[in-house]
Amino acid sequence: MIDFEKDILKCLEILRGGGLILYPTDTVWGIGCDATNEKTVEKIYKLKKRSDEKAMIVLVADEKDILQYVAAPDLSLFDYLDKTPKPTTVIYEGALGFADNLVAKDGSIAIRICKDEFCRQLIKRFRKPIVSTSANISGMPAPKFFKEISDEIKNGVDHIVHYKQQDETASQPSSLIKWDKGNVTILRP
């Protein structure tokens, strides 16, 4: 088994203390924080120099997390997600329990069930959803691997995960869809 226990413990300490982490996800490296804490979400908007009008993605560990944080999700969506090979983020209506500045004006939220083992362990042990937004200044390209992340981003977080820093496998953002009673609108392939 890959040893990322020290990173998990440090991330939990930072997340519980209202800080920001820089961490590898199932897609690109992300800046993360407690998705239920408005002050820490605001820190990410400031670090990325991004308007809080632009929504950010939230990671959860399991389908049951969707049931906890979304009002009346369409359960047939889970069958669709099981068949998609690429990590897929879904825009859900009726966000529940998230920081107000994370939820879109229409009450929707973008959530991805993360299959990456590091992220799943972190989320399960934190017991809350975690923000995951690409590790770049707004308007700049998302870094494909750790070495492409700017010093400005690295210096703006409270902890940088060591796990996967040497991995130079180019990564890409997730697919982004909107689900409406079985009808899929692909917003980002």
Image (cartoon, rainbow, N blue to C red):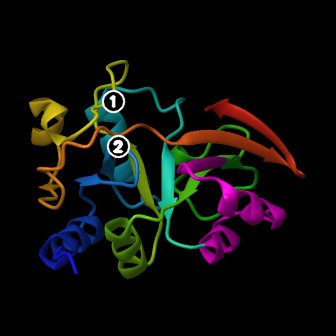
Measuring from the top left, give residue 44's x and y in whole percent: 33, 42
The answer to which quarter of the image holds residue 25 is: bottom left
- Quarter of the picture containing the N terminus is bottom left
Report how far apart the C-alphas of labels 2 and 1 lie in the structure. Answer: 7 Å
Residue at the (41%, 71%) spot, across then down: 120
Local secondary structure at mark 1:
loop
| Nearer to us in this view, 40 or 150 | 150
Q: In the rendered image of this protein, does residue 29 appear above or below residue 19?
A: above
Magenta stretch bounds: 63-90
The amino acid pointed to by label 1 is Ala
Q: Nearer the viewer, residue 65 or 183?
A: 183
**Residue 108 x, y percent position in the rendering:** 69, 46
Q: Residue furthest top?
A: 139
- Regarding residue 74, the answer to whether it shows in the image is no
Residue 28 numbered mark, or none: 2
Sooner in the amino-acid sequence: mark 2 or mark 1: 2
Residue 149 pos. (x, y %): 18, 34
Instruction: Give the labeled residue for mark 1.
Output: 142
**Residue 181 placement, left or right of 55:** right
Q: Quadrant of the C terminus?
A: top right
Q: Name above or below for residue 131 compared with residue 50.
A: below
The mark tally for this picture is 2
Under mark 2, the amino acid is Val
Reply yes or no: does residue 89 show up in magenta. Answer: yes
What's the mark number on residue 168?
A: none
Please report the residue visible at 28 percent of the width from the left and 61 percent of the height from the top: 18
In the displayed structure image, the side of residue 53 where residue 171 appears, left or right: left
Q: Secondary structure at mark 2?
A: loop
